[in-house]
Image (cartoon, rainbow, N blue to C red):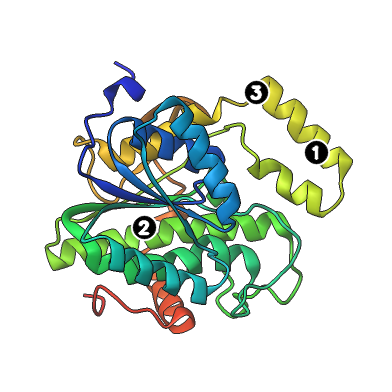
Amino acid sequence: MAWSESDIPDLAGRIFVVTGANSGIGWEASRMFAEHGARVVMGCRTVARGEEAAARIRSNTPGAKLEVMALDLADLDSVRAFAAAFKAMHPKLDGLINNAGIMAVPYGRTAQGFELQLGTNHFGHFALTGLLFDALVADGRVVTVSSGAHHFGSFDWSDLNWEQGYSAWPAYGRSKLANLYFAFELDRRLKVAGSGVRSLACHPGYASTNLQFVAPQQNRSWLGSAVFSVGNALFAQPAAWGALPTVFAVVSQDISGGEYVGPRVFQAWGAPVVQATGAHARDPKGWAALWEASETRTGVTFMGAAA
């Protein structure tokens, strides 16, 4: 039987953090968690937009337990402030959903000087995970949202800031490959430590969200916006379906750490299933290299030395 929203269990008493929760996959996942009784902390770069998003959930679920907190993953000071505020208010964390991301944007730098896509999509989430790690319950989960774009991602370890020959789509692919490297290396370290926490990765397939339109708007490309508008209308599944792999990875008891979840039909549409990544994503040497670079760049260390 295909897994759907109706299979989500009662989540009362559980607390989840969802990054990028004000729209798209993050909003739909937050809605599903809240509708099933969880308390959801919505990490949003713009609090006003986050409050509007929370209000949309409450309009259908009046008792929804939602909190909106400022979180800019492109600024490690914001990440540290979010983590400190969360731990001051909450005694535990059942699940961290590293969902927020930007896609194929023009070249830019984060507040700390990292290439913008890798800095936002990976380094910000690496730091957030490390800073919240000690709040996770014994059987907690860290779910990191990647993309089929990881298939065309690669690393030049001598130029992580992509100062030479930047190209927006390959940079996006690198950031999504980084999400997988991180999820799988975290899983490896958790298993070595004998931890009950599970680290998983997922992707939404081809889902209609606002993510596709950010880069065309920044590039002032009416053609890019038109292409995505037509593609979304003809081929994309709803954002709610795209969020199912994320929710499945967080709540299913029939899944192990280190697995990758996505839509079952051509990895683009349909119910969530465990599936294969690109072979290059299962590279322990790459995992270790990225982890070391992440600790160096963010100043955040956790899970001890690699074993």
Q: Nearer the viewer, residue 51 or 238?
A: 51
Mark 1 Cα shell of 10 Å, populated few (<14), some (14-19), many (≥20): some
In the displayed structure, 292 sits above or below 151; it is below
Judge left or right: residue 243 versus residue 230.
left
Mark 1 against mark 2, which lies toward the viewer?
1
Q: CA distance from mark 1 to mark 2?
A: 32 Å
- Residue type, numbered disc 2: Ala
In the displayed structure, 125 sits above or below 293; it is above
Residue placed under numbered mark 3 in the picture: 235
In the displayed structure, 205 sits above or below 60; it is below
- Residue type, numbered disc 3: Phe
Q: Position of residue 150 (x, y in %)?
A: 53, 51
Q: Position of residue 85 (x, y in %)?
A: 37, 68
Residue placed under numbered mark 2 in the picture: 183
Judge left or right: residue 173 versus residue 15.
right
Mark 2 Cα shell of 10 Å, populated few (<14), some (14-19), many (≥20): many
Secondary structure under tag 2 reads helix
Residue placed under numbered mark 1 in the picture: 225
In the displayed structure, 77 sits above or below 281; it is below
Secondary structure under tag 3 reads helix
Q: Mark 2 or mark 3, which has the lower sequence index? A: 2
Q: Mark 1 or mark 3, which has the lower sequence index? A: 1
Q: Mark 1 or mark 2, which has the lower sequence index? A: 2
Residue at left offset 44%, top offset 84%: 296
Q: Position of residue 264 (x, y in %)?
A: 43, 27
Residue at left offset 53%, top offset 60%: 121
Residue at left offset 27%, top offset 49%: 15
